[in-house]
Amino acid sequence: MGLLSRLRPAPPEMDFPRPAGAGARQSRMPWRLPDEPAISGIAADAVTVGALTVRAASLVGPGHRCAEPAQHRQDAYRLGRDPGRRFLLAAVADGMSDSSRSHLGANVAATALVAGLRAGLGRGADPDGPALFLDAARQMSGMAAQQKVTENDVRAAALAAAVPVEPAPDGTRAVWLSWLADVSAWLRTEAGWTRLTGTDKEGPDQDVLTEFLPFHPGRTRTARVAVPRGAVLALATDGIGDVLAGGAAPWFAERWAGPPHVASFVADVGYDARGRLDDRTAVVIWCDR
Protein backbone atom coordinates (compact mmCIF):
# COMPACT_ATOMS: atom_id res chain seq x y z
CA MET A 1 0.00 0.00 0.00
CA GLY A 2 1.43 3.38 -1.01
CA LEU A 3 1.75 6.42 1.23
CA LEU A 4 -1.14 8.24 -0.44
CA SER A 5 -3.39 5.21 -0.01
CA ARG A 6 -2.55 5.04 3.69
CA LEU A 7 -3.22 8.76 4.16
CA ARG A 8 -6.45 8.90 2.16
CA PRO A 9 -9.35 9.29 4.63
CA ALA A 10 -12.25 6.89 4.51
CA PRO A 11 -15.30 8.31 2.72
CA PRO A 12 -17.74 9.88 5.19
CA GLU A 13 -20.92 7.96 5.88
CA MET A 14 -24.23 9.67 5.15
CA ASP A 15 -26.50 8.95 8.10
CA PHE A 16 -30.18 9.63 7.53
CA PRO A 17 -32.60 9.65 10.48
CA ARG A 18 -34.33 6.39 11.38
CA PRO A 19 -38.00 6.91 12.29
CA ALA A 20 -38.61 3.19 12.84
CA GLY A 21 -35.38 2.17 14.54
CA ALA A 22 -33.70 -0.37 12.27
CA GLY A 23 -32.23 0.92 9.03
CA ALA A 24 -31.71 -0.66 5.62
CA ARG A 25 -28.41 -2.26 4.69
CA GLN A 26 -28.48 -0.44 1.34
CA SER A 27 -28.59 2.94 3.07
CA ARG A 28 -25.03 2.41 4.28
CA MET A 29 -23.67 1.53 0.85
CA PRO A 30 -21.94 4.01 -1.49
CA TRP A 31 -24.06 5.87 -4.01
CA ARG A 32 -23.42 4.90 -7.65
CA LEU A 33 -24.13 6.52 -11.01
CA PRO A 34 -26.33 5.28 -13.86
CA ASP A 35 -24.53 4.45 -17.09
CA GLU A 36 -26.35 7.24 -18.95
CA PRO A 37 -26.05 10.92 -17.98
CA ALA A 38 -28.05 11.14 -14.78
CA ILE A 39 -30.81 13.29 -13.40
CA SER A 40 -29.53 14.48 -10.02
CA GLY A 41 -29.97 12.01 -7.19
CA ILE A 42 -31.27 14.79 -4.93
CA ALA A 43 -33.42 17.83 -5.74
CA ALA A 44 -34.66 20.34 -3.16
CA ASP A 45 -36.31 23.74 -2.75
CA ALA A 46 -37.14 26.07 0.14
CA VAL A 47 -39.44 28.95 -0.80
CA THR A 48 -41.97 31.36 0.65
CA VAL A 49 -45.01 32.28 -1.44
CA GLY A 50 -47.18 34.87 0.28
CA ALA A 51 -48.47 33.29 3.49
CA LEU A 52 -47.22 29.83 2.48
CA THR A 53 -43.87 28.32 3.43
CA VAL A 54 -42.75 25.43 1.24
CA ARG A 55 -40.13 22.72 1.50
CA ALA A 56 -39.66 20.21 -1.29
CA ALA A 57 -37.22 17.35 -1.75
CA SER A 58 -36.83 14.32 -3.97
CA LEU A 59 -34.22 11.60 -3.39
CA VAL A 60 -33.28 8.46 -5.24
CA GLY A 61 -34.07 5.52 -2.98
CA PRO A 62 -31.49 3.22 -1.37
CA GLY A 63 -32.58 0.33 -3.58
CA HIS A 64 -31.89 2.33 -6.74
CA ARG A 65 -28.71 4.21 -5.89
CA CYS A 66 -26.37 1.49 -4.64
CA ALA A 67 -26.51 -0.91 -7.61
CA GLU A 68 -23.80 -0.87 -10.28
CA PRO A 69 -24.93 0.79 -12.45
CA ALA A 70 -27.43 2.77 -10.39
CA GLN A 71 -30.93 3.63 -11.56
CA HIS A 72 -32.10 7.16 -12.23
CA ARG A 73 -34.23 8.96 -9.65
CA GLN A 74 -37.70 8.10 -10.93
CA ASP A 75 -39.61 10.62 -8.80
CA ALA A 76 -40.06 14.26 -9.77
CA TYR A 77 -41.75 17.42 -8.53
CA ARG A 78 -42.38 20.91 -9.88
CA LEU A 79 -43.39 24.17 -8.20
CA GLY A 80 -44.86 27.30 -9.77
CA ARG A 81 -47.34 30.17 -9.51
CA ASP A 82 -50.22 31.33 -11.66
CA PRO A 83 -49.72 34.60 -13.58
CA GLY A 84 -51.78 36.51 -11.01
CA ARG A 85 -49.68 35.06 -8.16
CA ARG A 86 -52.82 33.97 -6.34
CA PHE A 87 -51.99 30.26 -6.25
CA LEU A 88 -49.03 28.07 -5.44
CA LEU A 89 -48.95 25.29 -8.03
CA ALA A 90 -47.31 21.94 -7.33
CA ALA A 91 -47.05 18.56 -9.00
CA VAL A 92 -45.49 15.32 -7.81
CA ALA A 93 -44.89 12.33 -10.09
CA ASP A 94 -43.67 8.80 -9.41
CA GLY A 95 -42.13 6.91 -12.33
CA MET A 96 -42.84 3.19 -12.37
CA SER A 97 -39.83 1.02 -11.56
CA ASP A 98 -40.43 -1.43 -14.40
CA SER A 99 -40.52 1.30 -17.06
CA SER A 100 -37.05 1.93 -18.50
CA ARG A 101 -37.55 5.68 -19.06
CA SER A 102 -39.96 6.41 -16.23
CA HIS A 103 -37.59 9.07 -14.85
CA LEU A 104 -38.20 11.04 -18.05
CA GLY A 105 -41.93 10.33 -17.94
CA ALA A 106 -42.21 11.58 -14.36
CA ASN A 107 -40.35 14.79 -15.15
CA VAL A 108 -42.43 15.48 -18.24
CA ALA A 109 -45.65 14.77 -16.32
CA ALA A 110 -44.79 17.07 -13.40
CA THR A 111 -43.71 19.88 -15.71
CA ALA A 112 -46.78 19.54 -17.92
CA LEU A 113 -49.19 19.54 -14.97
CA VAL A 114 -47.80 22.74 -13.45
CA ALA A 115 -47.57 24.43 -16.86
CA GLY A 116 -51.14 23.42 -17.69
CA LEU A 117 -52.45 24.69 -14.36
CA ARG A 118 -50.63 27.98 -14.84
CA ALA A 119 -51.99 28.46 -18.36
CA GLY A 120 -55.57 27.64 -17.39
CA LEU A 121 -55.61 29.85 -14.31
CA GLY A 122 -54.05 32.61 -16.39
CA ARG A 123 -57.07 32.43 -18.71
CA GLY A 124 -59.42 32.61 -15.74
CA ALA A 125 -60.57 29.00 -16.18
CA ASP A 126 -61.26 26.58 -13.35
CA PRO A 127 -58.80 23.68 -13.27
CA ASP A 128 -59.97 20.62 -15.20
CA GLY A 129 -58.22 17.53 -13.87
CA PRO A 130 -58.94 15.04 -16.67
CA ALA A 131 -58.06 17.60 -19.36
CA LEU A 132 -54.89 18.55 -17.51
CA PHE A 133 -53.78 14.94 -17.19
CA LEU A 134 -54.73 14.22 -20.81
CA ASP A 135 -52.39 16.99 -21.95
CA ALA A 136 -49.64 15.61 -19.71
CA ALA A 137 -50.22 12.14 -21.19
CA ARG A 138 -49.89 13.51 -24.72
CA GLN A 139 -46.62 15.21 -23.84
CA MET A 140 -45.31 11.98 -22.30
CA SER A 141 -46.26 10.07 -25.45
CA GLY A 142 -44.51 12.66 -27.59
CA MET A 143 -41.38 12.41 -25.48
CA ALA A 144 -41.46 8.61 -25.77
CA ALA A 145 -41.57 8.90 -29.55
CA GLN A 146 -38.61 11.30 -29.51
CA GLN A 147 -36.66 8.86 -27.34
CA LYS A 148 -37.60 5.99 -29.69
CA VAL A 149 -39.18 4.03 -26.85
CA THR A 150 -42.74 2.92 -26.19
CA GLU A 151 -45.36 4.60 -24.02
CA ASN A 152 -44.99 1.64 -21.68
CA ASP A 153 -41.41 2.77 -21.00
CA VAL A 154 -42.43 6.17 -19.56
CA ARG A 155 -45.27 5.29 -17.18
CA ALA A 156 -45.84 7.37 -14.05
CA ALA A 157 -48.36 8.17 -11.33
CA ALA A 158 -48.98 11.85 -10.61
CA LEU A 159 -50.74 14.45 -8.48
CA ALA A 160 -51.31 18.17 -9.06
CA ALA A 161 -52.39 20.87 -6.62
CA ALA A 162 -53.39 24.53 -6.64
CA VAL A 163 -53.14 26.14 -3.19
CA PRO A 164 -54.45 29.68 -2.60
CA VAL A 165 -51.61 31.89 -1.42
CA GLU A 166 -53.87 33.83 0.96
CA PRO A 167 -56.70 32.38 3.06
CA ALA A 168 -60.37 33.24 2.70
CA PRO A 169 -61.92 35.59 5.30
CA ASP A 170 -62.79 32.59 7.49
CA GLY A 171 -59.14 31.49 7.48
CA THR A 172 -59.56 28.43 5.26
CA ARG A 173 -58.13 27.67 1.83
CA ALA A 174 -60.00 25.77 -0.87
CA VAL A 175 -57.17 23.57 -2.17
CA TRP A 176 -57.70 21.94 -5.56
CA LEU A 177 -56.24 18.45 -5.96
CA SER A 178 -56.18 16.09 -8.92
CA TRP A 179 -54.42 12.73 -8.98
CA LEU A 180 -53.95 9.38 -10.65
CA ALA A 181 -52.79 6.24 -8.80
CA ASP A 182 -50.95 6.19 -5.47
CA VAL A 183 -49.33 9.62 -5.23
CA SER A 184 -50.97 11.04 -2.11
CA ALA A 185 -51.91 14.24 -0.32
CA TRP A 186 -52.00 14.53 3.47
CA LEU A 187 -53.33 17.18 5.86
CA ARG A 188 -51.74 17.79 9.25
CA THR A 189 -53.81 19.53 11.91
CA GLU A 190 -53.75 19.34 15.70
CA ALA A 191 -55.59 16.02 15.40
CA GLY A 192 -52.79 14.44 13.35
CA TRP A 193 -52.29 13.43 9.71
CA THR A 194 -55.31 12.76 7.49
CA ARG A 195 -55.01 11.21 4.04
CA LEU A 196 -56.78 13.35 1.43
CA THR A 197 -56.09 11.29 -1.69
CA GLY A 198 -55.38 7.65 -2.39
CA THR A 199 -56.01 4.59 -0.24
CA ASP A 200 -53.91 2.44 2.06
CA LYS A 201 -52.15 -0.43 0.31
CA GLU A 202 -53.36 -3.91 1.16
CA GLY A 203 -52.91 -7.47 -0.10
CA PRO A 204 -50.15 -9.29 -2.00
CA ASP A 205 -50.45 -6.98 -5.04
CA GLN A 206 -50.33 -3.74 -3.05
CA ASP A 207 -47.52 -2.27 -5.17
CA VAL A 208 -49.09 -3.15 -8.54
CA LEU A 209 -50.69 -0.12 -10.22
CA THR A 210 -53.63 -0.55 -12.56
CA GLU A 211 -53.87 3.11 -13.64
CA PHE A 212 -51.11 5.48 -14.67
CA LEU A 213 -50.03 8.01 -17.26
CA PRO A 214 -49.90 8.14 -20.22
CA PHE A 215 -52.52 5.38 -20.56
CA HIS A 216 -55.35 6.34 -18.18
CA PRO A 217 -55.82 10.13 -17.92
CA GLY A 218 -59.59 9.61 -17.98
CA ARG A 219 -59.40 7.95 -14.56
CA THR A 220 -58.07 11.10 -12.94
CA ARG A 221 -59.83 12.04 -9.70
CA THR A 222 -60.38 15.59 -8.50
CA ALA A 223 -61.31 17.12 -5.14
CA ARG A 224 -61.48 20.49 -3.42
CA VAL A 225 -60.44 20.36 0.21
CA ALA A 226 -60.96 23.03 2.87
CA VAL A 227 -57.60 23.48 4.58
CA PRO A 228 -57.81 25.34 7.91
CA ARG A 229 -55.54 28.16 8.99
CA GLY A 230 -52.18 26.96 10.27
CA ALA A 231 -52.47 23.47 8.77
CA VAL A 232 -49.70 21.57 7.00
CA LEU A 233 -50.33 20.05 3.57
CA ALA A 234 -48.03 17.31 2.25
CA LEU A 235 -47.92 15.98 -1.31
CA ALA A 236 -45.91 12.78 -1.55
CA THR A 237 -44.95 9.77 -3.61
CA ASP A 238 -45.43 6.37 -2.01
CA GLY A 239 -41.87 6.43 -0.67
CA ILE A 240 -43.22 8.91 1.90
CA GLY A 241 -46.94 8.09 1.81
CA ASP A 242 -46.42 4.44 2.71
CA VAL A 243 -44.49 5.27 5.89
CA LEU A 244 -47.00 7.96 6.88
CA ALA A 245 -49.68 5.28 6.64
CA GLY A 246 -47.44 2.64 8.19
CA GLY A 247 -46.72 4.07 11.63
CA ALA A 248 -44.21 6.88 11.09
CA ALA A 249 -46.84 9.65 11.05
CA PRO A 250 -46.03 10.86 14.61
CA TRP A 251 -42.33 11.09 13.76
CA PHE A 252 -43.00 13.21 10.67
CA ALA A 253 -45.52 15.32 12.60
CA GLU A 254 -42.83 16.20 15.13
CA ARG A 255 -40.14 16.79 12.52
CA TRP A 256 -42.45 18.96 10.42
CA ALA A 257 -44.26 20.82 13.20
CA GLY A 258 -42.79 23.94 11.63
CA PRO A 259 -40.78 24.59 8.47
CA PRO A 260 -37.29 23.08 8.99
CA HIS A 261 -34.05 24.15 7.37
CA VAL A 262 -33.95 22.70 3.87
CA ALA A 263 -30.96 20.49 4.74
CA SER A 264 -32.91 18.98 7.64
CA PHE A 265 -35.91 18.48 5.37
CA VAL A 266 -33.81 16.66 2.79
CA ALA A 267 -32.54 14.36 5.55
CA ASP A 268 -36.11 13.66 6.70
CA VAL A 269 -37.26 12.76 3.20
CA GLY A 270 -34.18 10.55 2.88
CA TYR A 271 -35.07 8.67 6.09
CA ASP A 272 -33.53 5.25 6.64
CA ALA A 273 -35.89 2.35 7.38
CA ARG A 274 -35.59 -1.37 6.81
CA GLY A 275 -37.54 -2.49 3.75
CA ARG A 276 -38.13 1.08 2.51
CA LEU A 277 -35.92 1.23 -0.57
CA ASP A 278 -37.98 3.23 -3.07
CA ASP A 279 -37.39 6.78 -4.28
CA ARG A 280 -39.13 9.33 -2.11
CA THR A 281 -40.48 12.82 -2.76
CA ALA A 282 -42.41 15.30 -0.62
CA VAL A 283 -43.69 18.82 -1.16
CA VAL A 284 -44.80 20.16 2.23
CA ILE A 285 -46.69 23.43 2.60
CA TRP A 286 -47.09 25.24 5.93
CA CYS A 287 -50.06 27.59 5.83
CA ASP A 288 -49.72 30.94 7.60
CA ARG A 289 -46.34 30.12 9.14
Image: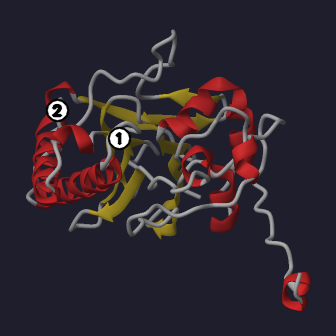
What separation in Å lies between label 2 and label 1 (alpha carbons)?
29 Å
Residue 12 rendering spot, x and y as whole percentages: 81, 70
Residue 276 drawn at (x, y percent): 64, 36
State the colouring used for the structure image: secondary structure
User: Between residues 248 and 173, which one lies in front from this camera angle?
Assistant: 248
Q: Which of marks 2 and 1 is in front?
A: 2
**First in sequence: mark 2 or mark 1?**
1
- Viewer-closest of 279 and 174: 279
Residue at image coords 65%, 58%: 265
Camera-side residue of 140 and 179: 140
Residue 116 at x, y = what percent? 17, 54
Q: How crowded is mark 2: few (under 14 residues within 10 Å), some or many (20 or more)?
A: some
Q: Quadrant of the N terminus?
A: bottom right
Eyeballing the image, is 244 above or below 50? Answer: above
Image position, residue 34 (x, y; %): 46, 61
Q: Name the residue under label 1.
A: 174
Name which residue type carries label 1.
Ala
| Res 153 quadrant in image | top left
Q: Which residue lies furthest to the bottom in this view?
A: 3
Residue 7, by quadrant, is bottom right
For the point 46% across and 23% down, which residue is it? Answer: 207
Residue 8 located left or right of residue 173? right
Name above or below for residue 34 compared with residue 161.
below
Instruction: Kindly identify the residue that appears in the image at 50 percent across and 49 percent down.
Output: 281
Q: Name the residue nearer the viewer: 69 or 241.
A: 69
In the image, 261: left or right of 129?
A: right
Give the residue displayed 41% in from the left and 50% down from the top. Answer: 74
Query: Where residue 215 is drawn, which disc sits there?
Result: 2
- Residue type indicated by callout 2: Phe
